[in-house]
Structures are given as C-alpha cells and as structure tokens.
Image (cartoon, grey):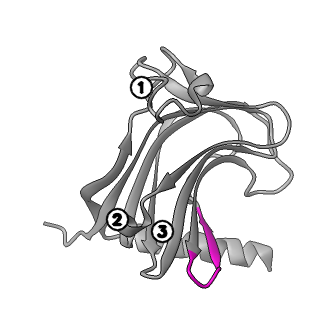
Amino acid sequence: MKKMFSVLLLTSAIALSAGYKKGEELYGNEFSSANALGGAFANAFVPGSGLNKDGAFCIYGANGSNFITIKLDEQKLKGIIYLEAVVKGAGIKKAEKPYWGSKVMLVIKRKDGTVKYAEPAMLTRYGDFDWSRVIMIEQIPMDVESVTIMLGLQNTTGIFYIDSLKIFKGMKDNGQ
C-alpha cells in the first residue's frame, strides 16, 4: 500500500510539472554570503563551496535532523509555483525511512489547520552526489495561512549543500 501511494505521489508530481515553465521570480537566494539570510544561519555558510566557488550553505547532520527554515510570503505564492534549487550531498547516510535524508521541503499550512509537506520528486536523498538542480511544481491554495521552506537533513548524517533557491510563478507552457 505504501509503495502504491509513493508511486501515485510521484506520478502526480511529474504530471503536474509537465507543461509549466518559470514566470515572474517570487523569491530568490543565491546563498553567496554569510548574510544571505539576513545573518541568520551565518555559521552554515562556507566560502568557496558553491557551484561557482562563491559559497554555499552547508547543513551538517551529525545525529538527528538539522534544517535552515525560511518563512516565505504566502500571499505572493498563491497559485501554481515553480521551485528550483541547486543542491549537493556528501556522505549522507541512507535513513530508515525513504522520505528521510536530504530535504528541500515546502510546509504549506492552510487556514483550516491542515498541513502539506511538498518535496521535489527527483531529490537524491542519500550518498554522495554532485551539484544538481531539483525542480518542483506546486499548487499553493488560496486559503493558505503560511508557507515555510525547510532545507537540510532529516534523521541522517552527512553534509547537504545549498547553492541557490528560487521560486517563480508557474506559467502554463503552451510549447511556444
């Protein structure tokens, strides 16, 4: 049953992403300095470690979970969004559950209290992997109360690097 549910989630994520392209940029961060998040999480910045050697935020998982959390402007995000992150992993141990490990996760809370945890389907969860671009298309409901992004490691050890994170308005791609 769990396997079938995972396949359905992956299939729906892939189906939703087909036919969308980037529109107006709603949020962008290149993580190229210790002040990229207004000084918060400055100790996670490692100069020279980014894709273009300018720097990246590095999340170290020694035991348990470690995240950078960013509260986003939920009013700007209502509708279809196109999220794109450039990430890398080093020595990330395979976790007990298949959805644990490296994380690029939107936490979408609705006004009725329901919460959705949305993640890119093609995110590598464990091991050593070079810089890769992960993409997610997501529907942010009109009755959204809050949207937070969580970047890091869940219930594992290793190092997770974040070079950039951008969120765009999702635009229907008519092949033009």
Q: Earlier in the sequence, mark 3 or mark 1?
A: 3
The residue at which mark 2 appears reads as: 76
Q: Position of residue 140 (x, y in %)?
A: 45, 73
Q: Dot 2 lies on which element?
A: helix
What is the magenta range?
110-118
Residue count near mark 1 (Cα–Cα under 10 Å), binned few <14, some 14–19, many ≥20: many
Instruction: Name the image quarter holding residue 81.
Output: bottom left
Residue 67 place in picture, x, y as percent: 67, 43
Secondary structure, mark 3, is helix
Mark 2 or 1 closer to N-term? 1
Q: Is residue 33 above or below residue 26?
A: above
Residue 161 position in % (x across, y down): 58, 31
Number of disc labels? 3
Compare residues 38 and 154 and report the one nearer the observer: 38
Q: Can the viewer see residue 120?
A: no
Residue assigned mark 3: 14
Nearer to us of marks 3 and 1 is 1
Q: Residue at x 52, y 73 (%)?
A: 145
Residue under numbered circle 1: 32
Badge 2: few (under 14), some or many (20 or more) residues near its Cα, within 10 Å?
A: few
The N terminus: image quadrant: bottom right
The type of residue carrying mark 3 is: Ile
* Quadrant where the image shows the C terminus: bottom left
Circle 1: residue type: Ser
Of the numbered discs 3 and 2, the one sitting upstream in the chain is: 3
- Give the residue displayed 52% in from the left and 76% down from the top: 12
Residue contact between numbered discs 2 and 1, judged by CB atoms under 8 Å? no
Instruction: Kindly give the residue lying farthest to the bottom in the view shown.
Output: 112
Q: Which amino acid is tagged 2?
A: Lys
Side of 108 where 126 appears, left or right: right
